[in-house]
Every structure is written in C-alpha cells, then in structure tokens.
Image (cartoon, rainbow, N blue to C red):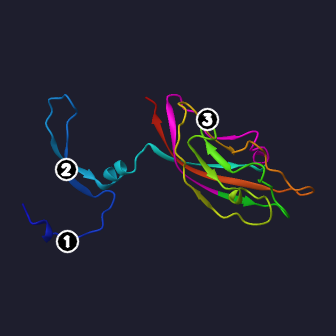
Amino acid sequence: MANTRSYPSATAKSDDLILGTSMPAANSNDNPRTVNFSIGQINGLANSPDIATAQVTITNAQIQTLGTSPVEILPAVTGYIYEILGVTTQSINSGGGSGYDWSASGNGVIYGIQSNQHRVEIPNANLPEGGASIGVPYVATPIAGSFRNGSGVKVGTTLGVNPSPPIGQTPVAQWIINITYRLIQAG
C-alpha cells in the first residue's frame, strides 16, 4: 500500500468518494464488501434526518390573545414526543407610539402540554412590543422537564394573561419564531 502522506491535499466536494466497508444486514449470510461512499452520503449521516427546524409567524391578532388562546406552532404526532433543541425569535414591530404591556402576562413560553414542563421561556423584554422600535433577535435555551406523548408545541404566556395595549394606542406586531426540534418515538 502506498504511503498516504505522498498524496496531495484537496478540498472535499460532495461527490468525491471515500473507500470503506459496507457491513451486511444482521443475521444474514452476506460478507462485508469494500465500496466507495460519497462525501455527500457521509455528510447526510452526520446531519441527522430526525432534527428539523420550523418557522412560524404569529400575527398581531394572535399576539393580542396569546395568554388565553395559545397558538400551536407544531402539531401533535401520535406516538411521538417533541424534544425542543433551541428557539430564536424576532419581533416585527410596525405600530406607532407605545406598545403592548406584558407585565401582567409573565414571560412568553413555548411548551408542550403544560407551560411549567419542558419549555422555552422568552423574557418580557424580548416579546413583541408593537410600537415603533425594531425588535432584536432573541435566542432561547430549552428548560428540561417532562413532555406528554402525542402533544403538540404551543406558544403562550406563563401566567395565561393577554398583553394589554395602552389606552388609546394600537400596537401592531408580528412575531417570527424559529424552532429546532427532534421527534422521538415514545416507548
């Protein structure tokens, strides 16, 4: 066999090939085979297909009733639970004057069946304002806890109270939520 240090280095492309061994299925009489695998195939294994990202836009009308009418952002899947891996949010504020008052609502929360279990909390300061200012993106980390089999993922408020607009003001906002998750088959 040649000394591998004598070969030049190169930048790998998706269709480049790597020599490897393909193992037979368990309990078969087949022998292992020497084959070529593409960089793209190997990369596909590294980027697990069971991890996904969804983007949801919460409308101004939904924001106004977020405490009493949580919005489903991922549908229930029978026989599976969601593992929330991460969330980013961005407020698109297009109103004028003062914005929503979230102080009586608690934080924003993305959760499964109950807002006190496996969840992601978004502090009041990072919830849609609905005023004239531009919202900054917020990156939230999930909080560990239990999650019910077959439950969807919702966004609401921790205290179940709607935000209140200031008297005489009409805040307008949209809330863009990007959620990265994994569906895990329940045992």
Residue 40 drawn above or below residue 148: below
Element class at badge 1: loop
The residue where tag 1 is placed is 8
> Measured from the top left, where is residue 39 in percent x and y?
30, 55
> Measured from the top left, where is residue 21 in percent x and y?
18, 46
Residue 19 drawn above or below residue 23: below
Q: Inspect the image, locate mark 1, and give the three-letter code of the amino acid beneath it.
A: Pro
Q: Please report whichever mark, 1 or 3, sits nearer to the chain's N-terminal start.
A: 1
Which-is-in-front pick, marks 3 and 2?
3
Of 91 and 45, which appears nearest the observer? 91
Q: Are marks 1 and 3 in contact (CB under 8 Å)?
A: no
Q: Inspect the image, locate mark 3, and give the three-letter code of the amino acid beneath it.
A: Ile
Rendering quarter of residue 98: bottom right
Q: Inspect the image, locate mark 2, and give the three-letter code of the amino acid beneath it.
A: Gly
Residue 12 drawn above or below residue 25: below
> Measured from the top left, where is residue 103 in percent x and y?
77, 54
**Picture residue at 23% right of the left edge, 55% below the top:** 18
The alpha-carbon separation of the residues under discs 3 and 2 comes to 46 Å
- Residue interval drawn in magenta: 61-89
Residue 80 counted in the magenta span: yes
Structural crowding at the residue carrying mark 3, measured as other residues with C-alpha within 10 Å and reported as few (<14), some (14–19) or many (≥20): some
Image-based side of 49 in relation to 106, left or right? left
